[in-house]
Image (spheres, rainbow, N blue to C red):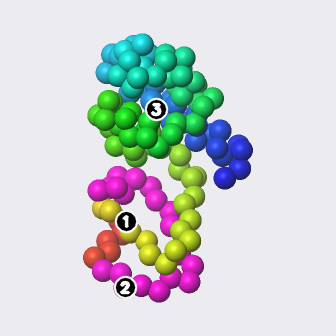
Amino acid sequence: MQIEELNKVKRCVGQRLKQQRETLNLSQIELANILKISPQQLSKYERGTDKIPAHRLYQLCKALSVTPNFFFDGLEDVKISFRDQSIWLSYETLKGQKVQIELCDLRATVSNVKIL
């Protein structure tokens, strides 16, 4: 991922974090206390200046009552590539989202596919 794309992702995730925190009427100090981090660190996440580690994203999902997908809404041009030969997708994960998947040299059996 290029630096521009990485910065776009960090900003989007940070904006979504701040939006949900404010929706729940939590102050930065309150959420920081729940996460056991400093309010300054939470501010860096919200501004998109620091990446949110996976374990922290998990904590945020629990604290804010959202799924990980919530943080990536608005990133329509993010591309995902798979290097192994198996791809697992969950309907619940994709429901209501725009998804573009490019498949190259894929050999598999596909069942129960519905395209809307």
Within-10-Å neighbours for mark 2: few <14, some 14–19, many 20+ = few
Mark pair 3, 1: CA separation:
24 Å
Within-10-Å neighbours for mark 1: few <14, some 14–19, many 20+ = few
Total residue callouts:
3
In the rendered image, the residue lying farthest to the right is 3
Q: Is residue 36 above or below residue 70?
A: above
Query: CB under 8 Å between callouts 2 and 3?
Result: no
State left or right for residue 103 relative to residue 22: right
* Dominant secondary structure, magenta: loop
Amino acid found under the numbered disc labelled 2: Thr
Q: Which residue is mark 2?
A: 109
Mark pair 2, 1: CA separation:
13 Å
| Comes first in the chain, label 2 or label 1 | 1
Amino acid found under the numbered disc labelled 1: Leu
Q: Is residue 81 above or below residue 12?
A: below
Q: Helix or strand or loop: what does disc 1 sit on?
A: loop
Q: Is residue 87 above or below residue 14?
A: below
State left or right for residue 7 relative to residue 58: right
| Comes first in the chain, label 2 or label 3 | 3
Q: Which quadrant, please, contains the C terminus? A: bottom left
| Residue 69 visible in rendering | yes
Q: Residue at x 50, y 63 (%)?
A: 100
Q: Report the magenta residues as a range.
A: 92-111
